[in-house]
Each structure stands twice: as structure tokens, then as C-alpha cells.
Image: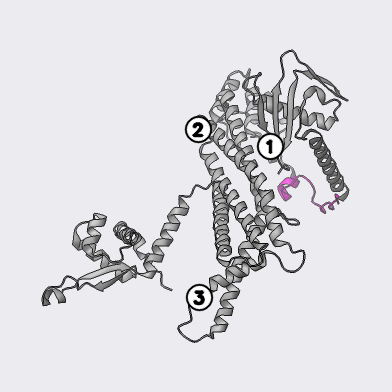
Amino acid sequence: MSYSTFSHLVADKAALYRRIMATFVEAKAHFTVHLRPEDVCERSGIQPLEEVQAALAQLVHWGNLEADPDTSRVTSVEEFYRARFLYQLTRTGEAAEQALQVFDRELGRRGALQAVALDDIRMRLRSLLELSRQERPDATQTQLLLRDLTHVFSDLAENARAFMSGLSRTLELRGDDQEALIAYKERLIGYIERFIGDLVTSSAEIAGCIRALDQAETGERPIAPLLRLAVERELEDLAPDLSGSVDPETARGAERTRVAAHWEGHWEGLKTWFLDRPQRRSQASLLRAQARRSISQMLEAVQRLNERRLGRSDRSADFRALARWFLECADDDQAHRLWRAAFGLGPARHLGVDAETLAEWRANPVPPNQSWRDAPPLRISPRLRATGSYQKRGALPRLQRRDRERAFLAQQVSREASELRAARAALATGETLRLSELGQLEPNAFSLLLQLLGDALGSATDPDRSIATTTRDGSLQIEMQPLGPETEAAIHTTAGTLTGRDYQLRITELGAPP
């Protein structure tokens, strides 16, 4: 296979060749197959004609274009023998242009979380389920539904992948622009929350339809006859083998196997996306968790921005503060201690400088201009000089087994996780009730409630307005409605009683924390 059709991309006149090829692609989109050099000049605006003719000849040489003699305007023998050509795209040239269009489109793809695609998938699965219950389902309708389902599902998966992969880069680019980040945060969180809500509501019905089509109570799966209908209808357009080297029945059997594997693979991909399996979560669940994490990342970026704005802390500010501390030092000893504390620099260990050495230096200072030969010596341990270490070398200590400690930590983590699940189950009921109606709470439930109240009240802009927010991991939603300044709620725990303004409270479980 030759890839010379891509040679024009790295040639000296690559821009000229790209304009000419784009002209042929646009002409074919308008059902114009052949173009003369004059037509190329008129459509592309490239001049002079001689340059266009030379470029067309080079593109023919690379295999992008095909040249046919143009005899339609010949009026004399001299004109007949003059080289005139009609140009059209070759099969390889058109394939190369399509590949370049896909390349450009994918580079510019922004991605999206398509809630509408979820509705389309749900509607087509419903229609397939109805067809599977018919005694003789229509083959044309079956293939069209399966083809549309494959197209919509592929578009949903690819756009979701592109959106989530580009989201982190977008957050990094907007991280230093406060106004842009705040405005982007509001739109992004609302956009993701709407998609998560649609994904939660649609995934259950989609998964139910897939199970109904894939699980057979008796006999084969309900989806199997529909897939066979799609395979047989696609095989109706199979072209015969002109070479005659392969038996027609053998070729048809091989093609049937390939097409059947193609449709079965699409169906398995749809199942993997929406159905959980043992020890492996569905792609829809992973997308939901990743979307929630993106909300947490956005909130953390806003928090870092607020911390940077409220209390500026950077390298230049740190060095200025350190310079003030040096100016406030009473003597050189304090300055030296501050230097060692700030930069972690100390004397060389092999010199053996201790308190006695420092006292000796203070009693008998050595001038900086005195030669090292006349200065008092520094005494070094003979073992350090011989072996490079103060301590005597010996056998390495035996490794200790930490199985008991690891088991204890595992039990502690498991106990804390179960206590957290119990606290979430006690609070995240989805029911609306007043804070004063909570009654006695266990310590873990009370600690979780304090954290939720802190997140909700911290995001409030007006104490008399309702509050709706989510936790940082996106797993819990808190809705609070103030009742009145004169109302009071008391929550009793073993550690004491918490009193404050009464609210109508609703805590909803959005999903397991990632």
C-alpha cells in the first residue's frame, strides 16, 4: 500500500496543494466530478494558470488526482494534439482528504455530555424490545433501529470521552483567571449536574431494556433474531467475487461471520456501557463518578483561588517576610539560626562541629584571612576517615513482619467505613424534615451533619434564602430552607447539645462516594 497521496502535506507548496484538493472535494460535494485547470482557478482564486497546471500535474504524479484527455472543445488537428486534461479525484486521493477532514475535526472536537443521546438510546431500545415480541419483525425496521442505535451510542461515548479528557486541561488554563473561573464554574457545575441527573434517570430504564433483550427465560435471547435479521439484510448487498478464486458459498459464510461479529460486538459494547458486572463497574457509572470528581476539582480550584486572593502567599512575599526577620535579629547568632532554619543548611557533618568547638571559636576567634595551615586543626574520627561512617558496620537488622499491624489497620478502616455508611443512611433519606426533628444522633452521624451544615452554610450568600449545594465528592446533595429568625433547633448527642436557627433540611444520596 502506497501512502504517496499524503506527500503534498510536506511538500514546498503544501498550502497550494491543500487549496486545490479542497476545491475538488467541494466540487464533488456539489456533484461536479471533473474540473479543468480554468475551473480550478475560478473556484479557488489561485493565479496564474501555469502554476495551477503544474500543481495539478504533480498531484496526478502522487496519485491524488486522475487526468483524462479533454477533447470536448477540440476544433482543429493542432488542438487535438495539444495536451488538455480533465481532472478528478482518485479513490486514494478522496480517502486521503477524508482522513485529513477527520483529523482536523477530531483536533477541534470540544466534546459534550449529550443528555439528548440518552433519550434517543432509550427510545430505540424500546422499539427493539417491541419488535422482539412480534412473531415476524420487519427486517428493514430492525436494521435501521440497530444502525441508528450504534451511531447514537458511538457519538455519545466519543463526545463524553473528549469532554472529560479536555475538562482537566480547561481547568488548568483558567486556574489563574479569577473572573473567568468563577463564571465557568457556575456554567460547568449546572451543566454537569443536569447531565448526571439525566444519566441517573435514563440509565435505569436503558439497563432494564438491555436486560430484557439480552436475558432469555427459555430458548435464545430476544435480541438474537434481530441481530440475525440485520446480518442477513446487510448480506443482500454483498458484491460477488469477480476473481472467481473463492467459492461463493465460502465467501458468503466468511462475510456472514464477520458481519455477525460486528453487530454482536456493538451489542456487547452497549451492555458494557450500561450494565454493571462482577468486579467491574459500567462505563455509565464510571462517567458519573468522573463527572462528580470534576465538580470537586472545580470547587477545589475556586477554593485555592479564594485562599490565594485572601491571603497572598508566594515566593516573593515569603522572601520579603524573611528579609524583615533578618533585620529584626538581635545579633549574628540569631541570624545564623534563622538561616539554618529557613534554608536547612548546616555545617559539614564530618567536621565534627559541636558546642565545645563553637565555644572555642568564640574564645579564640580565627581571622578570615588566616591561612588554613596556621589555623587550629579540626579533629576527625579515625573510623570516619577509614570507613566513611561513625558507626561500626555489622549485619543488617532482620525485617519485622507487620501482619498484625496491617490486620489491625484493615479492621479499623473497615469499621470506619461501615460507621460512615450507617451515618449516611441515617441522614441521607431524601425526606424533608426540620433540624429540630432530628432528635438524638450518634456521634458519627452528628459529625457528618456538622460537615454538611458547614458546606451548605458556607456557600450561602443570604441567610434568609434557601440553600442547595453538594458535597465535594458529589455524592450528597443538601437543601436547606430557613424557617424564621425566632425559631430554634436543638440537636442532642452524647457530647452535648447543638442549638441554633431551625431549618427545613433535605439530604439526598446522589451516589456512592468515589
Residue 367 visible in the shown view: no
Chain-order first, disc 1 or disc 3 = 3
Q: Give neighbour class at mark 3: few <14, some 14-19, many 20+ (Cα, 10 Å).
A: few
Task: Say above or below: 111 vs 311.
Answer: below
The answer to which of 251 and 303 lies nearer the viewer is 251
Give the labeled residue for mark 3.
238
- The stretch in magenta equals 382-402
Give the labeled residue for mark 1.
378
Quarter of the image for the N terminus: give it: bottom left
Give the labeled residue for mark 2.
180
Chain-order first, disc 2 or disc 3 = 2
Measured in 3D between alpha carbons, the distance from the residue under mark 2 to the one under mark 3, in whole angstroms, is 55 Å
Judge depth for marks 2 and 3 and give the one in front: 3
Judge depth for marks 1 and 2 and give the one in front: 2
> Which x, y percent locates residue 395?
82, 54
Q: Give neighbour class at mark 2: few <14, some 14-19, many 20+ (Cα, 10 Å).
A: few
Circle 3: residue type: Leu
